Amino acid sequence: MTSVSAASVSVRKMVAADLEQVMAIAASLKDAPHWRRSAYVAALDPVSMPCRIALVAAKSSSNNVIGFAIASLIPPQAELESIAIRLDEQRMGIGSKLIEGLIEELRTAAIREFMLEVRASNIAAVAFYQEQGWRGSGMRPRYYADPEEDAILMSYSIR
């Protein structure tokens, strides 16, 4: 598969027809959460609690999903639950487009603070979030398992 630039990618709401591609992306990445299909289905359910926003990044020419992001809403806050970009499409601005799309959706939902946890050892992810304007706000010791590791808490103020 050929790589694309962020300019040739559109961000849209995730739909049920995207789930196979979304789950394949998550399964292909060791650091991505490996949710059951039912968790993704719940993320698409408008009456599921907590309410979630699920977006995909897709190639404009083919509509093939190359990344996704899911946030849960607990107003006035939201939490980034998952973001994943296909390995061959990483570091091309796709993650930034997904974060921007989520922030626009969260702004519309009157969310004021966006939060996340990231593995302390995931230096690339921490740098990515810092470049996007996220700030460290604490630590969660031994938050992750397999391997056990601390989480860095980060937050982003939505204006």
Image (cartoon, rainbow, N blue to C red):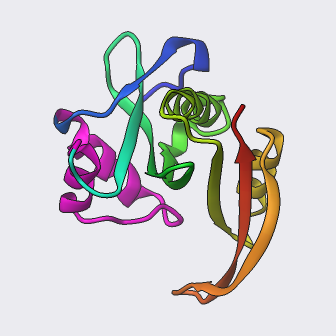
The picture places residue 41, in percent across and down from the top left corner, at 20, 51
Q: Give the position of the N terminus as an image quadrant.
A: top left
Asked if residue 5 can be seen in this view, the reply is: no
145 vs 108, nearest the viewer: 108
| Point 76% across, 57% down: residue | 126
| Point 40% across, 35% down: residue | 55
Magenta stretch: includes residue 103: no
Q: Give the position of the C terminus as an image quadrant.
A: top right
Note whether 103 is above or below 146 in the view shown: above
29 left or right of 25 in image: right
**Which quadrant of the view contains residue 149?**
bottom right
The picture places residue 78, in percent across and down from the top left corner, at 54, 51
119 left or right of 30 in image: right
| Point 40% across, 33% down: residue | 56
Residues shaded magenta: 17-46
41 vs 30, nearest the viewer: 41
The picture places residue 47, in percent across and down from the top left corner, at 21, 47
18 left or right of 9 in image: left
